[in-house]
Amino acid sequence: MRSSQSHSKEEPFKDKLETSSPNTAHFRILNIANTRYGKAGSVFAPILLESQMKIKRLLSVPIFSVLSLIGFVYYITVFIFIEDWIGLFTSPGLISSLIFTYLASLCLFSLAVCVLTDAGPVPSSYLPDVEENAGSDHDAKISALQVRHCEKCSTYKPPRTHHCRVCRKCVLRMDHHCLWINNCVGYWNYKSFFVLVSYGTLASLYSTFIIMRCAFQRNWNFEGMLPVNIFYVICAVMMISLSSTLGTLLGWHIYLIVRNMTTIEYYEGIRAAWLARKSGQSYQHPFDVGAYKNMTLILGPNILKWAWPTSASHLKDGLSFPTLRDSS
């Protein structure tokens, strides 16, 4: 009698586990394509949907703003300040302009990778391994499923996955939604985002250096030169502010990488640490497996490829991650 009751309890549990639907919007498009065009529609619909989303992300105000900023900084650095400092067509001027052009090109390439790479879609076939995490207790299984189930996407969430209200979908190892790339920063594009911030910091620091050198040797005669002097001051303030902002952001993400932590997990960890202290325990981030290993998990095992945004062969499926418990 007891076993039959247990069996009847498990049936709804199995049904719920097996009938989870994929992302609603994707499912609707696939259904329409399959109805109209048969098997061919079901094959090409995801490709068309992905292409449409990429074009939509590219043709947006945030991306236009970032490209305009990069173009403006490049123009004033190369054609105004390098020219005014040492001359654009001198040997030092050509070398300086080539260095800055190289950095600006890497920024543009990294930006394109960030925008065009899907941050981390959850596979529609994903099912949580509740047996491993919740043991044989039925109530514990249901509780684990409720925590991991996204009602908005009608799908189960792998570890470290969060729902983005802007993108309206769940993202693997979500860090944050970035307005300036018009995309989430997640498992598949976090490295390219970090590389973008790194190159952006280097380029802005180099531009600031050139502007300051140019300003120091400039004759600050305010008679008849007021508009030009104001322009120099505005550009210097802008580049110092940009360098400080990007440098702070870079330092923050270096800290997160060394700890193998996302921005969301950092703030979750503050509360977890507070609760642990309240109960007389200590808290350790479960995915922190050591500084060097943390860096290789995110940036890759080959240090020479850390600075290349498309080097992502070290990434797996984003559904499971080594933990502190595994390494101990």
Image (spheres, rainbow, N blue to C red):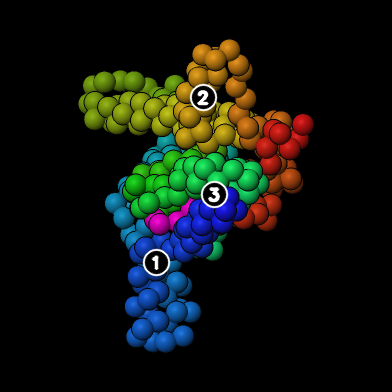
**In the foreground, 274 or 108:** 274
Is 60 on the left-hand or right-hand side of 299? left
Residue placed under numbered mark 2 in the picture: 272
Amino acid at the residue labelled 2: Ala
| Marks 1 and 2, how far apart at CA | 35 Å
Q: Which comes sooner in the sequence, label 3 or label 2?
A: 3
Q: Position of residue 328 (x, y in %)?
A: 77, 31
Q: Nearer the viewer, mark 3 or mark 1?
A: 3
Residue 99 in view (yes/no): no
Which numbered disc covers residue 55? Answer: none
Q: Residues within 10 Å of mark 3 (few under 14, many from 20)?
A: many
Q: Position of residue 68 (x, y in %)?
A: 34, 48
Residue placed under numbered mark 1 in the picture: 26
Residue 257 picture quarter:
top right
Residue 198 picture quarter:
top right
**In the foreground, 41 or 203:** 41
Amino acid at the residue labelled 3: Pro
Residue 158 is a magenta residue: yes
Task: Indicate whether 111 appears above or below 249.
Answer: below
Residue 253 is a magenta residue: no
**Who's the residue at 34% across and 61% down the image?**
56
**Who's the residue at 43% across and 66% down the image?**
50
Magenta stretch, residue numbers: 153-160
